[in-house]
Amino acid sequence: MKGIISKLVLLLIVFNFQSSILNLVFGQNTKWADKARQAVFSIVTYGTDGKMLGTGNGFFVSEDGVALSDYTLFRGASRAEIINAEGKRLQVLEIMGANEMYDVLKFKVEMNGQKSSALTVAANAPANGSRVYLLPYSTQKNTAPTQGTVKESSRVAGSYQYYTLEPALQDKMVSCPLMDANGQVFALAQQTSDDTDKNTCYAMDVRFAMAQEINALSLNDGSLSSIGIKKALPDSEEQALVTLFMASTANKEAYAMLLNDFITKFPNNADGYVRRATYELGLSLDEATLAKAEADLDKALEVSTDKAETLYERANLIYNYQLTNPEQTYKDWTFEKALNEVREAVATNDLPAYNQLESDILFAMQNYAEAYKAIEKVNASALASAATWYNAAHCKELMNASSDEVISLMDKCIGTFTPPYTEAAAPYLLERARIYSNAEKYRPALVDYDEYLKAVNGKVNDQFYYLRAQCAMKAKAFQRAMEDYVEAIQLNPDELTYRAELAVVNMRVGRNEEAVKILDVAIAKDATYAELYRLKGLALLQQKKNKDARVAFDKAKELGDPQVDALIEKYF
């Protein structure tokens, strides 16, 4: 019994001696060390193949899981987890900022509703010669900090400090926190490439690491894109919205996660719900997905601070859904509902963009008179454009207005462009050419066809030459018509209608022999095309070859041409 007591006394003496030594070395700092150690953890990163990529250290700087480490450890990682001082594994949720040059990274750990132990950031940088302490990761409660001294500090990246300390780092201490005498973190230890100096280590100002953040341009940041772990949204709503816009054409799953994150982070921003509804409608049109989109649109209206804008966005989505799915109406998602919502928006704030949508919806409902009234308001505003003037012209045309009214509106449409015309003006030039032609104003129609050809740098198909040739025929510009039919045939030699029309033009100018040659080539391609024989018969009649003409007419009749009987009766 006495022996046991003696051993206990000896152990107490040893423990008190060790504690005395620690107190001599660290003074009162062991009081903060035990608590601070809880904020330090180990990190394991994994590559895209699921295999371990690397291990390192980090520490928490906030109770909600914000932490710091080195960028190098995370480069190429698709997943990461931490092992805290209690040995628990927690997943890295998102990257919040990084700087490759200074090798720092800020990220957030998924805390599952729990709070993390966190280090307090020092308000002031330690002076040269100050005693500092490097706090290693450990699951052992009695792990003591490593003592050191600030040799020097230099200003970097604006107002931040880069420290040179002694002694050198021990193994596996990169990205561990450096603490001042008050137990506050002022830097994180960094790897050095200089292996010759065994008495020196370096550290980066912890405030610089904490200042790293995500912004709207981060999607194009090479250092961030090299990390496959999800990136956090910016803290600013405006920047977060820009990020959503820039990411909308990226990977669908990644974009969906960003949308969910945005709504979680900014639950009272209506735009997030509208964007998610838009994404959902683009994803699928099954009942379940439509119901989700509907719920998001309803929530958007509930939280909106600009009801008119949200009503407009809702109306636009419903209109586009019904426009592309006319045979599959979801609940009350009709043109009428879209019209009612956009008109409610107009009643609150009469904006040209709202008038434009109102006109589009009315046009889809074939209410061209009301659609024209709405588009007139747009054309009286700064939002007037070639497209809106064309829409007005199209409404008037479908209202059976005079060709002069329609052409006047098309003139205003073309007038928004400055000659020489580019491809932007080309569709409108072609449309005005059609309208001129329908109004039997063939010469100005030909001018628009010519301008169109120049606007598209001659990049047209056979159908263009066919249309221009027909217009030239009606304008009695027969040489131009022949040239255009030849161009059409070169682009599409198997379309026999072009050859038949070319033969007709030749006949109009008395080139009947040439017409017969053209028709014979066409007949060789398709001997069942009845109209070709009828045209050949007419060309032969003009050459006084009545016998051959009758043979051609008979063949046309045999093939079922409905017009040849009248010709036979007239000439034979």
Image (cartoon, rainbow, N blue to C red):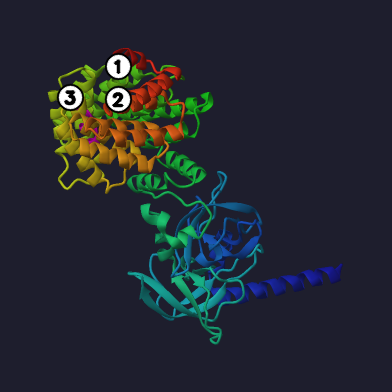
Q: Residue at x 38, y 35 (%)?
A: 268
Q: Residues within 10 Å of mark 1 (few under 14, many from 20)?
A: few
Q: Residues within 10 Å of mark 3 (few under 14, many from 20)?
A: some
Residue projecting furthest to the bottom: 196
Q: CA distance from mark 3 to mark 1?
A: 35 Å
Name the residue carrying label 3. Answer: 439
Q: Amino acid at mark 2?
A: Leu
Q: Residue at x 42, y 44 (%)?
A: 248
Q: Are marks 3 and 1 in contact (CB under 8 Å)?
A: no
Q: Which mark is residue 571?
A: 1
Residue 154 lies, in percent from the top left, at: 38, 77
| Residue span colored magenta | 428-435
Residue 429: in magenta span: yes
Closer to us: 200 or 252: 252
Main SS, magenta region, reads: helix
- The reply to whether residue 213 is in sight is no
Q: Which mark is residue 541?
A: 2
Residue 518 lies, in percent from the top left, at: 35, 36
Would you say 160 lies left or right of 251 here? Answer: left
Q: Amino acid at mark 3?
A: Ala
Q: Are marks 2 and 1 in contact (CB under 8 Å)?
A: yes
* Secondary structure type for disc 1: helix
Q: Quadrant of the N terminus?
A: bottom right
